[in-house]
Amino acid sequence: MASKRKTGGRSRRGGGTVFWEEGRGCYVGLLSLGRDPETRRRKRVKVYADSEAECWERLDQLREEIRRTGIVARRDTDVEGAVRAVLDSPPQEWRSPVTLRVNRAYAQHIITAVGKTRLARLTAGQVDAMLAAMARQGASRRTISGTRGLLVLAIRRAERDNIVARNVAAVSVMPAAPTRESKALTLEQVGALLALDLTPWWRALITTGVMTGLRPGEMLGLRWEDTDLDTSVLRVRQALKQGSGQGRASLTPGALKTQQSRRTLRMPAPVRSALAALRREQAADRLRLGEFYIASGLVFADSAGRPVWPQDVGRAFKSLCEQAGLGRDWQVRELRHTFVSQMSQAGVDLEVIADHVGHTNSNVTRAVYRHQLADEIGTAAQVFDRLYGEPS
């Protein structure tokens, strides 16, 4: 084992000692905390740095920490331990298993980059470097922000437990990262999709998404008992959720996103026709499979009557868009964006659109779908054209 030879020691009265330790290859700062009242043993705390100046700076920070809090935070907890403590005891607002799964993915970014770093020695610069590396590797702004948020939460708990005195993640800088803006299909693009040789399942899903504005989870959780093809009424009462179980059993009906998401809609004629065709196909599947058919009651079930994986739907939708000449950069939720865009372009009032898509109010609709809403405000022009007419 290499000798940890100490050289070049310098002391400041009441400010500690700094020396070079050959075995560690760095400067070490030593601050005396006096003697333990019970054991009478001298208590010391160490800091480490690449330069003598930085070592003195860290000792100064320690003395300031003692002045402010009366203690020196524990310095044996690493970043990985702090992050895993949050995952093991998540906050109450992480109700959904999906939220926990997403934060576990965020945790892997942190653990890979700085997991073995002592929490008390983590710097804002290290956090900045981690986030910048994620941006260079193509991570979305949402992923980078979520990763930073998890680290902020982990260090905040460590502050509470006197493990650290400062939350360096909270002062880190978010790097510039590409943000994929959601987009809407044009009438021509919707026509290109519907012109494909689609199965009744896909024709019904695309038509329903574009013409009713249901969320993907609301469509996949839609039940036949909530659709009345005779009166063209569709009731949104549940959504398909992915729980914490294993396999397809984890796909279960769940509550809607908000109370306002519970709504009753009138089906456009193409939706009614597409759902009727899908119902006939499901009846044929039921006859073909007999007792092996799973009667889930879902409108958008698979050929055996079971719930379908949202991820599978997303991948297949990208392929259909590619076949239609639209490219692969499309997501199922953009059928809903298309609904909002086409309603707005047709001049439908924003409050009415908000009711259709199940938002609490039109402010939410405006914030979420600002790129899909028509930006031309024509009410005043219509009023004054009517009052004053064309100039002579």
Image: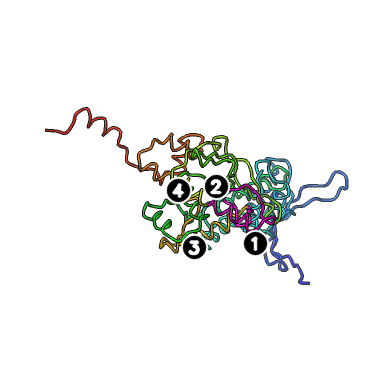
Which sits earlier in the primary sequence, circle 2 or circle 1? 1
Residue that carries the numbered disc 3 in the rendered image? 319
Name which residue type carries label 2: Met
Instruction: Indicate whether 379 appears above or below 109.
Output: above
**According to the image, label 2 marks what residue?**
219
Q: Secondary structure at mark 2?
A: helix
Sequence-first disc among 2 and 3: 2
Does residue 166 appear in the picture of this structure?
no
Which quarter of the picture shows residue 287?
bottom right
Amino acid type indicated by mark 4: Val
Which residue is at 42% across, 61% downward? 324
Q: Earlier in the sequence, mark 3 or mark 1?
A: 1
The residues colored magenta run 278-306
In this rendering, position of residue 149 left or right of residue 356: right
**In the current view of this chain or complex, which residue is farthest to the right?**
39
For residue 225, which quarter of the picture? top right
Left or right side of 224 for 343: left
Residue 205: x and y in percent read 51, 51
Quadrant for the C terminus in the image: top left
Label 4 sits on a secondary structure element that is: helix
Which residue is the site of mark 1?
Answer: 112
Between the residue at mark 4 and the residue at mark 3, the CA separation in whole angstroms equals: 18 Å
